[in-house]
Each structure stands twice: as structure tokens, then as C-alpha cells.
């Protein structure tokens, strides 16, 4: 059965109607603040997923072929249920959410390939969700706007994947702009493009190639811990239940009621929000040295207060501190593995990568995967045929 589908996709390769390119993202600063009504400063990147689509004339039969995984997902739109293989639920979740919003979805074939490292904190999943929604919206004239596509991608993760994620990843993938990061207020969803020029510095990502397997449950735990802490502080002070309505003084005043763990979670969120706003000022003033310091402080908060780092990430961030050419470094994304982001002078990249790779290998017996990246365009149709 699979062979037949593969064969037919191969034959159909030249007759795709539409090509979509959808990026991963890096987050300069503002981690685990999105689901806490906070601020984030992400950018879409030049690592992307490429998806080709065609309507196949069927009412409900869809195929999605992933080159990377060399497997084909076959979906019947009239019988949506959760899948077992990792990436399948991102696709199934998006299709389900689209069907809840519109009646226009029909059978299609899709083929995709990507150079975004999977499970590395740079949102290969949001790239997939947004590329899929974008392509199908265009292919079938579904009339969804960008925010609808962003939000349905987020709901797909909640309902099919089981991660209670915030809005940052899908927002970054869809709204990205070349040479800009984006200050997003996750409470109001207002956002501002911030010119992000770093020369002679560059953004260097070091992929630890580890993903600790409790990451989904630990992610959801963090959300629960911060919101239960917030509730205590807000109730005590009679203010609305939002991190934007409470202050560090209020959190400090409730330390005993909160207990140490919730105290750390809540104070981290407020401090990280403040760092995001300061980071924007640094970019506007072209003060990369101060931006770098904020990155280090942010990582400390993630490691010690929010506890979403891991030994591999901490090791790489610490390693970078001895290099004056590195202005700052921190973990990115959900945490518990994935990449560190380093702001480094371009002339030092090669020697730093060599030294970090050697030290990392020695310590963990794991190879490091470095890549440079730049703020790039968001999800877009790149080709229309026929
Ligand atoms: C994951 C989630 C985002 C965000 C980050 C942490 O990438 O999908 O919504 O919470 O973690 O900042």
C-alpha cells in the first residue's frame, strides 16, 4: 500500500499546484513568558520547511509525505483521530482544527522536506503547522487570515500533541521579517518589528543534540506552577489574574505563601519580561554588549529559577563565558535540550566552534551541531503552478 502511494507521489512530483516555505524561529530572549501574558523577542530563521501541495480530486483522502522521515501519512478527513508517530500529530491536529473552522477542506497530496533540526528548540513543529495551514488555505481558498492560522497551529499542539504551548512559535513562523526580530506582547498580541542588525557579530546556534524525554510533561508542569503561583499573588493583592497586573514587590511579599518553587517561577517570569523590554532598547541603540549580558542573565534565570535547562546547555553557556568574542549566550525554546544561541564576533566563529565541539565531546561523548542563522521572512507561497 505504502509503496503504491510513494510511487504515485513520485509520478505526481512535477504536477504540484503550490509550494510553500515556512521557517523555524529563534527567540532572542523571553522564554516561557508567552503563555504567562508576557513579552517575547523572536525572529523567523533561514532554516525552513518546504511543502508542495496539490488537490487530488478526492473528497477526504489526503497523503503527506516527509522526505526526512521517508514515510507517508494517509489521512481520511472524515475520520480524524490521533496518530502514534511523532510528526503525524502536528499534521492531524492542523487538519482537525481547519475542519472545525471551515467546510472547504478536500483531499490533497503534500510532500515536504526540511533543513530545520527537529526537536532542537527552533520550532520545526510550528514551521510544519504553519506551512500546512498556509498551503491548504491557499489551495482551497479557505479564507483564513494569518492570526487564524497562527492560533489554529497552537490549538493543534494543545489538542493533538499535548503540549500546552504559548503563541510565540506559530506567530514567529508566520509573521517573520528579514533582518528583524519581533517584540510581541502575548497579552494583547500587539507587536513591533525591531531592526536586528548585528554585524560584525552573528547569531551562532550550537545544537546539543539532546532532548530530555520529559520535556512535554515538564513544559506543562512549568505552566501549571507559574499560573498557580500567580493566582496566589493576584488574590492576595486583589488584582486581575495576570502577570501584567503583579509586580516583583508583590511576589516578594508573598514568598512564604508561594513556597520556594512557585516563588522562583513567578519571579523569573517578571524578571524575564523586564529583560525582553531592555533587550529591545539595546537593539534600538545598537548596544550589543548589553544585549549579550541580558542573554547570560536570562540563561541564569532559566537554569536556576525556572529550571528548564540541562547539563549540556549549561555547559555550553558556561564554556562561552571565557570567550570575549562571545557577547552573550543562552538556551532557546522550551528547554531540556536543543540549542544555545550565541552572539559572537564573526571572526571567532570557527575557532570557537572547534573548541566548543572538542570540549563538549570530551565531557558528554556527543557531537555538537553548529549553525549560523539570520532573521528571515515568515511563511510564504514561493511557487504557483497551473
Ligand atoms: C516552546 C513553546 C513556546 C514557548 C517556548 C518557550 O517553544 O512552543 O510557546 O513557550 O517553548 O519560550
Image (cartoon, rainbow, N blue to C red):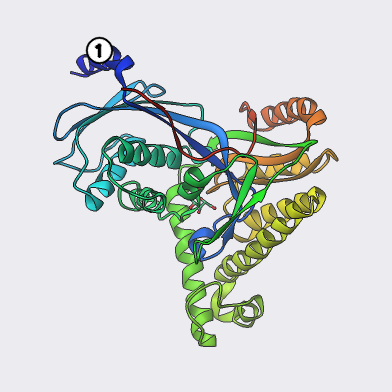
Quadrant of res 306:
bottom right
Let me know if residue 186 appears in the view: yes
Q: Is residue 85 left or right of residue 232?
A: left
Residue 168 in the image: state x and y as whole percent. 50, 52
Q: Is residue 75 above or below residue 3?
A: below
Q: Quadrant of the C terminus?
A: top left
Residue 297 in the image: state x and y as whole percent. 72, 56
Residue 21 in the image: state x and y as whole percent. 45, 32
View extreme (front): residue: 386
Q: Which residue is mark 1?
A: 7
Let me know if residue 184 appears in the view: no
View extreme (right): residue: 324
Tell me the element at label 1. Answer: helix
Residue 364 in the image: state x and y as whole percent. 64, 32
Q: Residue at x 28, y 37 (%)?
A: 84
**The CB of the residue at mark 1 lies under 8 Å from ligand 1:** no
Q: Is residue 124 left or right of residue 203?
A: left
Name the one closer to the observer, 41 or 385: 385
Q: Residue at x 67, y 52 (%)?
A: 299
Name the one closer to the observer, 301 or 360: 301
Q: How many marks?
A: 1
Amino acid at each position: 500500500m505504502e509503496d503504491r502511494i510513494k510511487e504515485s507521489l513520485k509520478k505526481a512530483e512535477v504536477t504540484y499546484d503550490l509550494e510553500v516555505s515556512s521557517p523555524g524561529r529563534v527567540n532572542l530572549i523571553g522564554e516561557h513568558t508567552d503563555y504567562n501574558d508576557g513579552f517575547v523577542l523572536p525572529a523567523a530563521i533561514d532554516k525552513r520547511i518546504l511543502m508542495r501541495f496539490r488537490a487530488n480530486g478526492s473528497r477526504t483522502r489526503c497523503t503527506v509525505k516527509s522526505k526526512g522521515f521517508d514515510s507517508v501519512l494517509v489521512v481520511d478527513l472524515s475520520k480524524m483521530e490521533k496518530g502514534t508517530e511523532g510528526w503525524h500529530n502536528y499534521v492531524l491536529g492542523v487538519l482537525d482544527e481547519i475542519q472545525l473552522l471551515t467546510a472547504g477542506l478536500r483531499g490533497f497530496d503534500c510532500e515536504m522536506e526540511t533543513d530545520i533540526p527537529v526537536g532542537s528548540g527552533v520550532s520545526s513543529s510550528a514551521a510544519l503547522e504553519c506551512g500546512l495551514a498556509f498551503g491548504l488555505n491557499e489551495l482551497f481558498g479557505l479564507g483564513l487570515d494569518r492570526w487564524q492560522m497562527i492560533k489554529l497551529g497552537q490549538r493543534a499542539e494543545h489538542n493533538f500533541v499535548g503540549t500546552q504551548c504559548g503563541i510565540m512559535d506559530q506567530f514567529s513562523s508566520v509573521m517573520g521579517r528579514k533582518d528583524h526580530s519581533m517584540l510581541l506582547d502575548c497579552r494583547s498580541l500587539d507587536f513591533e518589528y525591531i531592526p536586528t542588525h548585528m554585524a560584525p557579530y552573528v547569531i551562532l546556534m550550537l545544537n546539543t543534540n539532546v532532548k530530555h524525554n520529559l520535556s512535554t510533561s515538564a513544559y506543562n508542569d512549568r505552566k501549571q506552577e507559574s499560573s498557580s503561583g500567580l493566582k496566589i499573588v493576584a488574590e492576595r493583592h486583589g488584582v486581575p489574574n495576570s502577570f501584567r497586573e503583579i509586580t516583583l514587590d508583590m511576589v516578594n511579599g508573598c514568598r512564604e505563601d508561594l513556597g520556594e518553587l512557585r516563588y522562583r517561577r513567578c519571579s523569573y517570569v517578571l524578571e524575564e519580561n523586564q529583560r525582553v523590554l531592555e533587550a529591545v532598547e539595546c537593539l534600538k541603540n545598537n548596544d550589543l554588549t548589553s544585549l549579550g549580558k541580558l542573554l547570560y542573565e536570562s540563561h541564569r534565570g532559566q537554569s536556576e529559577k525556572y529550571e528548564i535547562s540541562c547539563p549540556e546547555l549549561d555547559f555550553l553557556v558556561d564554556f562561552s563565558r571565557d570567550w570575549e568574542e562571545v557577547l552573550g549566550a543562552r538556551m532557546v525554546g522550551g528547554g531540556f535540550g536543543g540549542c544555545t544561541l550565541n552572539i559572537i564576533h564573526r571572526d571567532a566563529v570557527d575557532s570557537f566552534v572547534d573548541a566548543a565541539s572538542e570540549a563538549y565531546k570530551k565531557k558528554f561523548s556527543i557531537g555538537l551541531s553548529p549553525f549560523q542563522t539570520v532573521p528571515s521572512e515568515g511563511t510564504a507561497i514561493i511557487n504557483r503552478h497551473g
